[in-house]
Structure formats: C-alpha cells, structure tokens
Amino acid sequence: MNPFSSATRLSRGAFCCKKECAAIRAAVSENDQDYMHRNMAKLMFIHMLGYPTHFGQMECMKLIASTGFPEKRVGYLGLMLLLDERQEVLMLVTNSLKQDLNHSNQYIVGLALCALGNICSAEMARDLAPEVERLLQFQDPNIWKKAALCSIRIIKEVPDLAEIFLSPAAALLKEKHHAVLITGVQLCTDLCKLNAEALKYFRKAATKMEPKKNAGNAILYECVETIMTIEDNSGLCVLAINILGNFLSNRDNNISSDFF
C-alpha cells in the first residue's frame, strides 16, 4: 500500500474545494439566483471540511429573504452553520426572522424557530421574544416543541424575559403529545433555575398528581426521594413517609413493589 496515497487524496480534495469555491464566488459575482441555493449547499459541505466560506454569509441572508421554501431552508441552514451569535451581521436577519415567525406557512415558521434557537443573541431575544411567546400557544405540536426549545435559548440569553413564558410553559404540561411534554418540562425546569417566581408558580401544577395512574405515582415517588435527599425535618418528611406507606399498602404490584 502506498503510504502517500492518503496525502495525495487530501491534496486532490483541497484542490477540488478551492476550485469549487472559485466557481461559487463567480456565481455570486454574477448574481446567479437560479442555482444559488444549490451553491450554498455545496459551500456548507466545504465549510464542514474546514475551508474558509465567509464570503457566503451574505448570500445566506438573501436566501432567507426570498419567498420560496427550498431557498429559505438552505439559507437558514447556512445561517446556523456559517454564523454564530457573536457576529454583528446577524442583526441584518432579525427582520426576516420576525416576518417568518409570523408566516402563514407553518414549515417556514419552523425553520425560523430552529434558526433562532441555535444562533439567538441577546438583542435578537429581546426583539423576537413576543413572537416566540405567541407561538407557544399555536395549535400545532411541531410548532409548540420548536417554540419551547427556542424559548429556552431566549431565557438563557436574557433571564429578565422569563416571566412572559410562565403561563404558556405551564399550558404545555397539559398536552398529551410526548415531544411537547418533554420540551415543556425542560422549559419549566430552566425557568425555575433562572427565576424564583417561576418556582412558586409551578408548584401549583406539582401538587395535583393522579395517584391512580403510574405516571402520577412516579412523580410522587420522585418528590419523596427529593425530600429524603435534602433531609428535611419539617412536615414534608411526614408527608413523604405517608406517601411511602400508601405505596406499600397498594394492591397494585407495579406500585407496591417496583418502586422499592
């Protein structure tokens, strides 16, 4: 086996990437919009190989501002790959994001939410938080879960915005869609970590478990385990012991034995 074969392939690959970048640069200079989304897809692959692709950033902005879904999809994917929240050029895309978050096409709304959840800066969070909060009440599970994940990014960037997400986040816990529930629980958890008022707010959901269902008993058991871990000496410890007694006396083997 030729020991230089790998190096030869790498050098050929480098030459091909440089050649392709030059072709894409020429297409950008000629303002060739018909194949721009394909060229940007190639550029993203070249970026993942480690070659400089900064000249494609503005073209991603143009694709996002276009009306077609394929162009927007490539544009938002390029936005997430080629930029991050530290670059000032992101401010140019805020208006496009706001328009797409209010778009009639739910798939375009989903693209905007995914992008915002990945590259959101503090300034963008302040500008776009009302749109994301509104989408948490949108009548579609796919939008709900993406809006919940986007909300997590927003409150981490700007903790002061946590209050506007309390009521919508609590509403997600009542949904039966598993993906919505998982993202809703994560949003509620992060809200409690960042905001003391949120902890008080969500305790009112937390005290109404259904003891006849395994899910409700599992939550009660986690509460008992938490009380025992913190070694609370108040009435909480008595409450935990009473719940354990109810578990042991239950005729359902899933409750009386599996939990212990």
Image (cartoon, grey):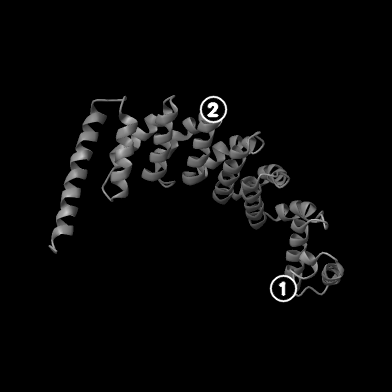
- Above or below, 82 relative to 39: below
Closest to the camera, between mark 2 and mark 1, is: 2
Answer few, some or many: residues within 10 Å of disc 1's Cα (few below 14, many 20 plus, some between 14 and 19): few
The residue nearer to you, when weighing 104 against 54, is 104
Q: Residue at x 48, y 41 (%)?
A: 115
* Crowding near the residue tagged with mark 2, few <14, some 14–19, many ≥20 C-alpha atoms within 10 Å: few
Task: Say which element carries label 1.
Answer: helix
**Label 2 to label 1, Cα distance in Å?**
48 Å
Checking the image for residue 229, the label placed there is: 1
Residue 166 in percent (x, y) is at: 70, 46
Residue 147 as seen in the image, left or right of residue 18: right
The amino acid on which the numbered mark 2 sits, given as a three-letter code, is: Asn
Residue that numbered label 2 is attached to:
105
Point out which mark residue 194 bears: none
Q: Position of residue 139 (x, y in %)?
A: 66, 33
Q: Earlier in the sequence, mark 2 or mark 1?
A: 2
